[in-house]
Image: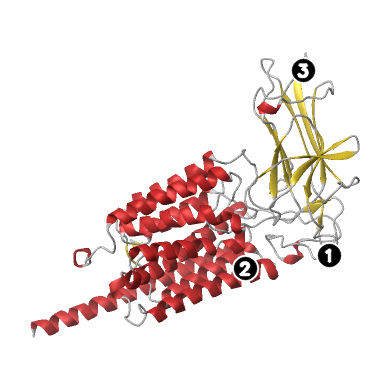
Amino acid sequence: MAGRRRPIVPSRLAALAVAAGVILATAARLAAPGAPPLYDGVVPLEPYLWVNPPPGQAHGPNGATAEVPVEGGQSPLVAVATTELQPQAQVFATPGALVLPPGAKTVKVSIEPLAVTVKPASGYISGNVYRILVTDDKGQAISAPAEAKVSVVLRSADPTLASASMGLLVNGAWQEEPVSPGGFGGTFIAVVTKFGDFAVIASGSDPFASGVPPSSGASGSPGATSPAGPTAPPPASDGPLGGILGSRAWLIGGIGLLIVAVVLTGVVSDRRRRAQERARKRGWRR
Amino acid sequence: MTALIRPAERLAPSLASGTGVVVTLGGLLLVAALRWAATDLARLDRLDVGAAFGAGLLVVAIGAGWRPGNIRWRAIPAGLLGGGVLVLLAFVTRPVPQLWVPAAPLLPWAATTILVATAEEAILRGVLLDRLTRRNGALVALLSTTVVFALIHVPVYGSQVLPLDLGVGLLFGGLRLATGGVAAPTIAHALADLATWWL
């Protein structure tokens, strides 16, 4: 069958297309490293959880704490995130990145969501304020040199937010730090040298203040966000497959049926085509 | 083995005409617009919308004459290699490791992701590239399907993904031209999409 068909194009065009594609994709990724890693989009996001939710939004953000022992006088790997399925606040430090006070035995990290009490000079805070504290076992503050690239990652309340800055509350005013995009859902990364109260600061007017929030892309029905009380936890696993199947067994079944239907279509079509070819050959012989 | 391309020669002549191209493209854009409306206007569940989007594209592709055929075996390593390059690229250029994963159970998410990748390849690199190649030549077909591929992602991610998706579209188109079927770009596409669960 393949022998009868002429090649659609010279192979040189195919090779050029592959090479150009890889070069362009590499350049695009290097130019915007936080761009979505997906090349297509099925990206369910959890609704943002607020300390003080605007009308119709969900309440009940989580905090996080961790205590990591110091080994060999060097700060340990720190990777702490709040416990939402998609963490709303994260802090990362590679081993040795933090400047430890003398005699430090452990590094304590705490992330606490807070309501917004201080507004930025311009723009608005998208989401909660997060108090991120990193101390030693005696409670002494730990800092980090800029070159260590210790990073704080915050998710904004607006998943469509494309640009923002990271605010650090210093002496009662927001000091804005540059960020790089951290992937889907309005997530932003800032390299930090000290810790304290952080928030995502966006320019313009707050879409949640207008009462018409931007599309959350939330996974689950619109009713999954409740204005009163904490958001319901994810459904419990009903068995060994519950965690990976969730309540979507019907979706798996539907897609399976679709695949079977497509394959059957191909089989029927192929048989029909072969029958026609046989009939044609018989015609030729006569 | 199942797969993924109905050779151009087997398409009905009417479907390979200019009208066929316009109708197929119209169907694709309609499904993409419905997806945008369902996600951004009606705020429906993205996983459900993604599954419906994939099924819709597949219906358009089949309606336009695409049928699964036989996979050429060389398409499998080509697809794995292409997908591997994209996964590696995403891995090495990510700014910091992140702990979050898509807020959905793995299997439904993976099934939907594979469905969408397959459907997009069936209609773009299967039906449209095939027809445009016959009408306008391979270069025009490659560039046109690449641009359409990038554009249908703009409502989902914004215009900042255009350079990346243009590059990825060229890569997938090149795989399609090199192997003669949509199996290779489908494998690469699905692999790159699935890897984002862990990236």
Residue B112 x %, y %: 54, 61
Q: Which residue is mark 3?
A: A104
Give the image location of residue A63, x and y in percent: 79, 41
State which quadrant residue A78 falls in: top right
At label 3, counting other C-alpha atoms closer than 10 Å, the crowd grade (few under 14, some 14-19, many 20 or more) is many
Reply above or below: B112 against B74.
below
Rendered residue at 82%/25% (across/down) = A141
Residue at mark 2 to residue at mark 3: CA–CA distance: 53 Å
Q: Is residue A177 above or below residue A78?
A: below
Q: Chain of mark 2?
A: B
Label 2 sits on a secondary structure element that is: helix
In this orientation, which residue lies closer to the viewer: B183 or B147? Answer: B147
Disc 2 and disc 3 on one polypeptide chain: no
Chain containing the residue with disc 3: A
Q: Quadrant of the C terminus of chain A?
A: bottom left
Residue furthest out toward the left? A286
Which is nearer the eye, A71 or B12?
Answer: B12
For disc 1, the chain is: A
* Distance (Cα) linking label 1 and label 3: 48 Å
Q: Disc 1 on helix, strand or loop?
A: loop
Looking at numbered disc 2 in the image, what kind of residue is underneath it? Answer: Trp
Examine the rendering and report whether any part of residue B199 can be seen.
Answer: no
The residue under label 2 is B36
Badge 3 amino acid: Ala
Report whether B58 appears left or right of A58.
left
Residue with the mark numbered 1: A211
